[in-house]
Amino acid sequence: MPPLDLTADEVLTTTRAVRRRLDLNRPVERELIEECLQLATQAPTGRNRQRWDFVLVTDPAKRAALADLYRLGLSRPRGRVVQDGVNRGDPVRGQRIADSARYLFDHLHEVPVLLIPCIRVEGRHETDSHVGQANTWGSVLPAVWQFMLAARSRGLGTAWTTPHLHYEREAAELLGIPYGKVLQAALVPVAHTIGTDFRAGPRVGPDDITHWDTW
């Protein structure tokens, strides 16, 4: 499948978190995933160590087990009180997001590919400090975002999710990930999208977030 006819700016502004418009019935070609991975490996990474790994889960039983951990993370997060996810600043938009999240909650096990991006560490204590956090996540996030941009340009939808990380050890056991040396960063559903016409999302303007020389 050739890439969509999108400019770089269009890819950057229309790569949305896709949930309800994931095509649950259409298989994702392995070649498309491999093309996205090839582009992801070109992302910048701390000291050029390239210490990320990508675990692709297509086995139905493992997808179902991961989806159960995701649901458990949302309904019974370890060490946290469940929060209402509705955006109170915009009730209509907040309800739309809540409905979208509920759809993924109900259908995650049906998504044809689940991606677990990981990063190899010296030990799980590596993220104890602010600097350690910045170095670690700053070395994996660009690669995952690059994967997601590549996916968008090929008619695939993705969404960054983290609830399963409340049960990261269980996910590591399920997938054979060495828990002591590898951190999971997210769970990203990957599927063809129903339609490819995505628009730029509502965002604050640059003037609202920019500080020149001083806060």
Image: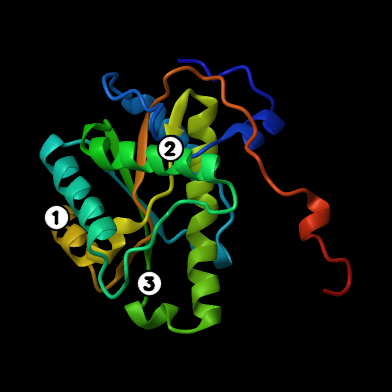
Q: Is the residue 52 above or below the residue 120 in the image?
A: above
Q: What kind of residue is marked 3?
A: Val
Image location of residue 73, percent across then percent down: 26, 59
Q: What kind of residue is marked 2?
A: Thr
Q: What kind of residue is marked 1?
A: Leu
Give the alpha-carbon distance from disc 2 to disc 1, as whole Å. Answer: 22 Å
Which picture quadrant has residue 170? bottom left
Which picture quadrant has residue 198? top right
Q: Residues within 10 Å of mark 3 (few under 14, many from 20)?
A: some
Look at the numbered disc 1 and give the secondary structure of its residue. helix
In the picture, the disc for residue 121 is 3
> Which of these two is toward me, 74 or 67?
74
- For the point 39% across and 38% down, the residue is 99
> Which of these two is toward me, 155 or 122?
155
Q: Nearer the viewer, mark 2 or mark 1?
A: 2
Image location of residue 161, percent across then percent down: 38, 51
Q: Which residue is mark 1?
A: 174
Coloring basis for residues: rainbow
- For the point 72% across and 49% down, the residue is 204
Q: Please tell me which of labels 3 and 1 falls first in the chain.
A: 3
- For the point 58% across and 46% down, the residue is 90
Asked if labels 1 and 2 touch by Cβ distance under 8 angstroms, the answer is: no
Q: Nearer the viewer, mark 3 or mark 1?
A: 1
Classify the position of the C terminus by image quarter. bottom right
- For the point 64% across and 22% down, the residue is 6
Q: Please tell me which of labels 2 and 1 falls first in the chain.
A: 2
Image location of residue 83, percent across then percent down: 38, 62
> Which of these two is toward me, 22 or 84?
84
Q: Which residue is mark 2?
A: 158
Image location of residue 121, percent across then percent down: 37, 72
Look at the numbered disc 2 and give the secondary structure of its residue. strand
